[in-house]
Amino acid sequence: MSGRKILVGLLAAVVVAACGGGGKRATKEVAAGMPIVTRSADSDAPANAPAHWLPPDAWVYNHWLPYDETRLYRLLGITRVGLWEQLRDDRRTLAQLAARHGWPDARTLAAALVAPEAGRVGPARLATLRQRALRTITQGHLAQHVFFHSLHQFGIASEAPAIFGVNDMEFRRLRRAELSPLAIARLHGRSPGEVQALAIAVLRERARSGVRGGAMPAAQAGRLLRRQLSQLPRWLDQARYNGPPPTYRGALVEVPRDYASNPAISADGRHVAYEAYRQKLPLAVKFGEIAVMRADLATGRSAIVSRLPRGGPTGPDPISAYNAAVSGNGRRIVFESSRGNQNFAKRYGRIGVMLADHHRTRGLDRRSQGVPDSQSAYSPAISADGSRVAYHAVRGGRTVILVADRHGRTRTAASGTPVGGSRFADPYESSLSADGSKLVYTLASGRLDDPAAARSQVLVRDLATGTTTVASRAARRAPARGFSADPAISPDGRYVAFTSDDPALGARRGHAGLFLRDLRAGHTRRIPTGAAQVLDPVVARDARVVAFAARAGARSRVLAWTRSTRAVTLVSRAEAAADGASDDPSISSDGRRIAFASTATNLDPGKSDDARAIFVRDRVAKTTRMVSDPLAAYPKGTVKPPAVRPVPVALPPPNALEAPGRHDVLVVDNAFVHGAERPTVTIAPGTRLTWRWRSRESHSLTVRAGPERFTGGAQNHADYAHRFTKPGTYQIACALHAPGMRMTVIVGSQDEPE
């Protein structure tokens, strides 16, 4: 599924020009057919560091800002929005902004920022904080990360085995394949409620660790944590991967290609809204990384729905548009929109919800002034008649679902609990019936002190009567005991499809099945899916057809169940089954046409590569056609192919993972290994234990608890040894990938056998 990966705007053609490497050199490299090389703009970066490079320091990875950010705003007389505008370009620094506001000397400003800590820490620690503050002032990309990428951290991923059911590296691979964290968890038998509880616990532990270690003031830790917790529901449900691409010595290991994703077909089956990913850097920086498109199946043409930005006084204004939903006749399209980085178009600005109606586009949400929570609105849905739009936002410290009507009136249809408490409840995965009268969504809830008891239910809100009904139930008065999620409501509002692992419904705990609830008759039936795991069900009118993505191992297909015959048929096919991964189904109201995304090469004569594209299967005519056109996302005449296509960098063979010796521990990417990951090693006093790095990423080791403390610096090769002389238990972690990358060493007493 490599064609589906968002490569963070480090896009084909002239990449280095916007990343500090020099445009002439980049053009020459592309013309010579060499790999795409990126360069960090930060002056502290090594010579071969890629554009997204960050120093391998725990305080950077964990966003432990060494001062209270509100003090920065007061000293400079600026706002957080003004800081965002300055740091939008990696080549600009906070030092330049400070000089314009009366602070020409960066060291003086750094000292002033950390001055309140002088009474709480010793001279050595104060000097460290001052140096870190200086780096936030002089290093543009580092500052952008620490201030604005609060959920771009390794803490949650490091605990992926417990939270998502896979190890850290597999979690990242699945994220690059654009599975949301919640989808990854469901595929591995994890409840959305349990996932949220465990993720909150990790974020809280990271904030406490920063304060306890003297790396961050308590007030700033509270501000960071609230920001993270208010963004967490969006992050957990977000399929689009917005992280860095894989690189080797600054060069991309894959050549980015334009592609399409996330289809939404109109109820009448004529139009398909989808995302087109622009992977040509100069044009992505000018226009935005992602565009919302509308394909007209009658004419066979695609047109841009999202507007093209014009730029501004500080340079280009890349704006991405994505996550579209479409009205029944295809005229009205609602989508998310976010401004991006001016170097490589990466999205990191506030997310807003936009409504495009013919030639007019307007924003539906409003920014809340003077609040510390996330300001984004996301996950829009639109009724088929175009009368109502639902979307998620944070209001009053809690996640809510807002519903706006065609007259501009907005009301809260569902809400969670305020962030920061001992209990949580947040709505996810909403959609509307065709007339906008019913809203279906998932509610994940629980207590932080008992993640295993957290649950998720599928609820239906009647917007006319204000009543809420539990759809995920086996009988009229028996809500599901396992987790239920991933709902879709039929256009007529009578049926709800959802996934659940409730044994009372016939599922197996940890392996969700697909179910259809008849709200009027009050009964639930199971839809046969075999051994596959199910994602993203969609329902036609009267539930005559239910389509869904079925995953079995690395294989992903789109299937359809017909209620009248109870038969399940393959949708992702032409003459033969698709030879690539297929998912993200969307269905017309009558169930005849199903749009889906696929990397297949055998579904349409016009597509022979494995880049992701959008297809429509006509179940009556038994035809499949490609409807996406990524080139249509560029203004006419702007795309000029390079003389020679760039090539991916050649990776060295992986390090051989030799069996460690009796007193050796291997340090591989995101894990300590001694027989197993997260090992417990028992040794006698006086034993010398050696850690042998065999990783591509940098890792460190530090004693978090134990009779004595020692630290091995961040590296990705060589060895580190320590002789243990004091008996006791040592808890050891990688400071960069804590708390999940850890191990235990037990040093017995002198007379105990090893």
Image (cartoon, rainbow, N blue to C red):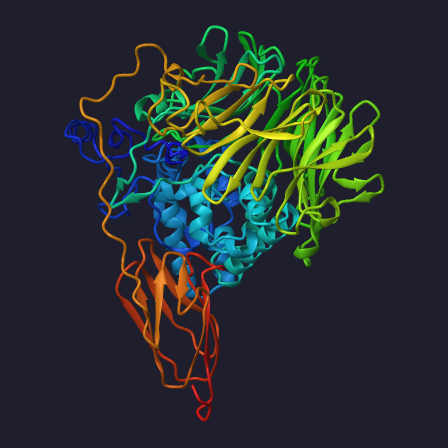
On screen, residue 390 above or below 525: above
Place of residue 324 in the rendered image (x, y in percent of width and height, measured from the top left): 55, 23
Place of residue 30 in the rendered image (x, y in percent of width and height, measured from the top left): 19, 29
- Write down the quadrant of residue 439 in the picture: top right
Camera-side residue: 617 or 478? Answer: 617
On screen, residue 330 above or below 368: above
Q: Quadrant of the C terminus?
A: bottom left
On screen, residue 343 above or below 252: above
Place of residue 52 in the rendered image (x, y in percent of width and height, measured from the top left): 34, 41
Camera-side residue: 562 or 291? Answer: 562
User: From this viewpoint, is residue 470 visible?
Assistant: no
In the displayed orientation, state which residue is furthest to the bottom: 751
Q: Residue at x 43, y 15 (%)?
A: 308
In the image: residue 57, left or right of residue 27: right
In the image: residue 450, left or right of residue 54: right
User: From this viewpoint, is residue 458 visible?
Assistant: yes
Camera-side residue: 124 or 352? Answer: 352
Q: Residue at x 74, y 29 (%)?
A: 413
Camera-side residue: 424 or 279? Answer: 279
Q: Residue at x 26, y 35 (%)?
A: 20
Q: Quadrant of the N terminus?
A: top left
Place of residue 134 in the rendered image (x, y in percent of width and height, measured from the top left): 37, 49
- Write down the quadrant of residue 714 in the picture: bottom left
Q: Residue at x 26, y 64 (%)?
A: 718
On screen, residue 747 above or below 650: below
